[in-house]
Image: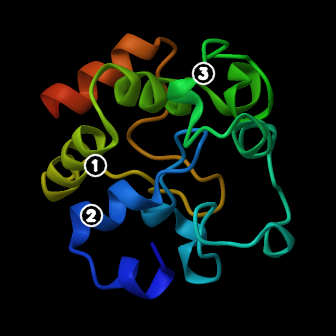
Amino acid sequence: MKYEEYIALGRTGRIENSIAPCGLVCELCSERTHCKGCNFSKKGELECCCHQRRCCDKKGFEGCWECSDFPCGKDMHDVSQHGVRLIAFTEYIKRNSRKALAERLAENEKNGIIYHRDPVNYTGDYDGYSEVEEVISLLESGEKNV
């Protein structure tokens, strides 16, 4: 899909098509004003080019949800640096689909559950949990427990 086609999609479609290999949801990211996201940026356009993107490119995967080594604990899936949100999102995709994650995120957003409340630290309502299943519960129920 070309970036122009992506822009023309509805909210849920943009969320679904913006999910990075690591589970990051570029459409909902505070950096969105100056970054096209992992799926639409050329390799030279991204500063980070994280382990997950490089690994998935090498293995021919759309995302870590297709990998038998998930979660690898590296880079964006290092819980000590990034918490469990991205692992939970990736696990949710593995169990359901990218579309299902996008639908839950869009619905929760309508109900006030925000991906990034803090544009400096890139944290929001899905952060602050210590267990993957707690994030998945928030996705499915739309009710905060933190």
Q: Does residue 142 sit above or below 48 in this rendering?
A: above
Say which label, 2 or 3, has the lower sequence index.
Answer: 2
Q: Nearer the viewer, residue 5 or 24?
A: 5
The image quadrant of residue 76 is top right
Q: CA distance from mark 2 to mark 1?
A: 7 Å
Callout 1 environment at 10 Å: few (<14), some (14 to 19), or many (20+)?
many
Name the mark on residue 67: 3
Q: Position of residue 22 (x, y in %)?
A: 60, 38
Q: Position of residue 143 (x, y in %)?
A: 17, 30
> The disc labelled 1 sits on which kind of residue?
Ala
Task: Tell which residue pokes out farthest to the front in this image.
Answer: 60
Say which label, 2 or 1, has the lower sequence index.
Answer: 2
> The disc labelled 2 sits on which kind of residue?
Gly
Q: Specify whether 137 is left or right of 143.
A: right
Q: Nearer the viewer, residue 3 or 105?
A: 3
Q: CA distance from mark 1 to mark 3?
A: 20 Å
- Asked whether the beta carbons under mark 2 and mark 1 sit within 8 Å of each other, the answer is yes
Residue at numbered disc 2: 13
